[in-house]
Amino acid sequence: MTEPELEDVWRRESPHVLAALLRRHGDYADCEDAAQEAVAAAAEQWPRDGVPDNPRGWLIRVGSRRLIDQLRSNRSRAVREETVGTAQPADAYVGPAADDDTSPGGDDTLVLLLLCCHPLLTRPSQVALTLRAVSGLPTAAIATAFLVPEPTMAQRLSRARTTLRDSAVRFEKPTSEELPARVAAVLDVLYLIFNEGYARSTGDTLLDTSLADEAIRLTRQLHAYLPDHDEIAGALALMLLTDARRAARTDERGDLVPLAEQDRSRWDAGLVGEGVALLEEVLPHGHVGAYQLQAAIAAVHADAQRYDDTDWAQIAVLYSMLDQVAPSPAVTLNRAVAVGMSAGPTAGLAALQPMVDDPSLERYHRLPAVRAHLLEMVGDLAEAERQYARAVELTSSRPEQRYLAHRLTRLRERGATGR
Amino acid sequence: MKYVILIHSNPEPWGHPTSDFVAEHQALPQEQRHALNADFEALLTELSDNGELVGGEALAAPSAARLYRWDAGRPLATDGPYSEAKEHLAGFFLIDVETQERAEAVAARLIGPGETVELRPTMSGGGDDQ
């Protein structure tokens, strides 16, 4: 067995092994250590003795033994009993055999995902822990994908472990009252991972996969566990419909290609079809949340053969609905764009006016960028120039800045020859 | 979101931590100096523990700099300092935080008397295609 093969087995089995250990002993940090030792033992024994028939059972058995050894050696008996007594589920002593890896609901990974996105953890810690525990990725790979040094990422993980330990967070499925909010947090974390990967043109590589692909894989799993949860289906549809544009959204230099200029023949029809099918199934249920609405908007874009065929009136309606469910400056702004495209740039500028008058949005770079576009369309080139210049100063996205700087330069050249 | 925090200072003689050598800082009562220094250390520990500190360095004296300029078609090297300004770049931190508000709070805690702290967002490779 080669190292990459072992890596594969580990990535596949890691959430199950961790979950099995966590059901016996609630402390995440201890269980992660024990699981890590089981992998180390596998790396030593499997190449020599061959891969066991049931690798998962083997890893769980070895991990459990290491966990018991750890508890014996690290703590005095009294302390151990106290900790074990509070941290273990009631059925721990009469529970399943050491190599039985199925919990009653068979939803180990789900409970682990919910644990990783626990509300006590900060968002960066939730992201790090999800990729570490559920995806089984090494800390170094996660750090590289998020463009931070390994010690910084290790610190986020360590803080997460400490928080879970200090708060004695249990490894158990939340009550049905808690579940919706907990699932919502998982979706936000998965979408953040997706976006972190998707938004970037390069550098989001995670070993042999990407952040976006990994987020989609985990969301698919979540959808399989909770098929009746419409927002999970919505988030999955949104990721698929967005990811479908991946090949078309950057040019050969890695520069961003705006939606208006993308070659739609390069959109992935398979992903679009899957996303649309998911939406068509859940939208009629009527519990329309923010992810379903954003997915619906992406579906309207996907439905247009050419940019000029886009049903902007429909998109404006969907953004108005989104403004009710999950209001944000980005939503208001996108609604104004849709209004501008369907009812004309003057109407779009009017829709933007409340944002222009809001001092808290003074540094929001997309506002001058959108105003500049609309001003260019109505022919107010001098003001468009000023707004482009403002947007260039405010954005911290390199591709967006290059795009805006090109628009500004073109406008200035036009002005120079026209004058 | 990543930000670089640039510390512009004028320690005399040049030294780190700069607060030990900045006149305005030295003029403060001992107690207040201790409190400021302790808060600085606490902040660094906090950033590191949170996984918010990405990196940082203290810089050697401006006079130790070598400057390169294009001159008649080829590079010409001279000795520093880069600028005649009173304050010089003395060091930097790179942080990765969740919000602009958090970055501003961190920068505000790094400032002491006689120095200027500059908070600049870094450019990211990501972008929106809408």
Image: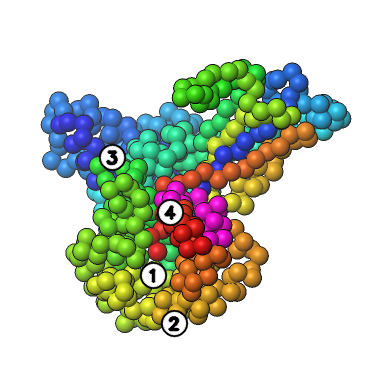
Q: CA distance from mark 3 to mark 1?
A: 30 Å
Labels 4, 2: front one: 4
Q: CA distance from mark 4 to mark 1?
A: 29 Å
Residue B66's quadrant in the figure?
top right
Both labels 4 and 1 in a single chain: yes
| Span highlighted in magenta in the image | A385-402
Label for residue A343? 2
Residue behind mark 4:
A406
Residue B86's quadrant in the figure?
top right
Q: Earlier in the sequence, mark 3 or mark 1?
A: 3
Both labels 3 and 4 in a single chain: yes
Which residue shows up at 12% across the image and 31% down it? A50
Residue behind mark 1:
A294
Q: Earlier in the sequence, mark 4 or mark 2?
A: 2
Q: Give the residue type at disc 2.
A: Ala
Q: Give the residue type at disc 3.
A: Leu
Is residue A352 visible in the rendered structure shown here?
A: yes
Which residue shows up at 21% across the image and 69% down it? A273
Q: Earlier in the sequence, mark 4 or mark 1?
A: 1
Are discs 4 and 2 less than 8 Å apart at CB? Answer: no
Which residue shows up at 27% across the image and 77% down it? A280
Q: CA distance from mark 3 to mark 4?
A: 35 Å
- Give the secondary structure at mark 3: loop
